[in-house]
């Protein structure tokens, strides 16, 4: 099995910053593309940012210039640095990873989610 454990969510004032972390563990031969998604109350889950194993990144237009995705392959961890946070960033943020297991099975794995609340 593969597990993703997120941390770093919480309450922050508008204009503030938070850093989310997501650590992968388990039956992992290789950790391929990783991503952050979010789901606001009453809305569909949306893609926030993606990063390849080699570090190529892509962002939703709504977070470009404010959020930065990065990863530490040795630690099997992906990060999301969120700056200039806005109330509309309030959502449960989910980590996503595409994994190749030791049995060469390709898996898509989700974390349990961490809540980010932006409010004064």
Image: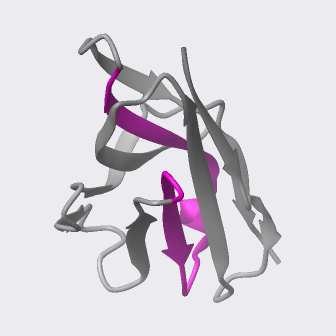
Write down the region rendered in magenta: 75-101
* Vertical arrangement, residue 25 with respect to residue 36, above or below: above
Magenta-colored stretch includes residue 94: yes
- Find out whether residue 95 is within the magenta segment: yes
Picture quarter with the N terminus = top right
**Which quadrant of the figure has residue 54?**
bottom left
Where is residue 27 shown, x and y percent of the image? Answer: 48, 22
Residue 111 point in image, percent of width and height: 58, 32
Q: Seen in the image, is 2 located left or right of residue 61?
A: right
Q: How is the image coloured?
A: one colour
Whether residue 117 is situated above or below residue 38 in the rendered picture = below
Q: Nearer the viewer, residue 30 or 21?
A: 30
Where's residue 77, x and y in %?
52, 55
> Residue at image x 41%, y 65%?
71
Q: Is residue 8 left or right of residue 54?
A: right
Q: Is residue 104 left or right of residue 120?
A: left
In percent of the image, x 55 and y 63: which residue is there? Answer: 88
Instruction: Kindly identify the residue that appears in the image at 21 percent across and 55 percent down.
Output: 52
| Depth order, front residue of 42/30 | 30
Please state the horizontal and vertical placement of residue 112, each as a whole percent of the image: 65, 30
Residue toward you, 111 or 37: 111
Q: Give me the residue at 61% from left, 59% from top.
A: 21
């Amino acid at each position: 099995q593969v597990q993703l454990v997120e941390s770093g969510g919480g309450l922050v004032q508008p204009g503030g910053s938070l850093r989310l972390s997501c650590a992968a563990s388990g039956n992992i031969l290789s950790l391929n593309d990783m991503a952050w998604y979010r789901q606001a109350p009453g809305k569909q889950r949306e893609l926030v940012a993606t990063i390849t194993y080699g570090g190529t990144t892509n962002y939703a237009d709504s977070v470009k210039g404010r959020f930065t995705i990065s990863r530490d392959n040795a630690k099997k961890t992906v990060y999301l640095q969120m700056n200039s946070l806005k109330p509309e960033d309030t959502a449960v943020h989910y980590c996503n990873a595409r994994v190749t297991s030791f049995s060469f099975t390709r898996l898509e794995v989700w974390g349990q989610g961490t809540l980010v609340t932006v409010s004064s």
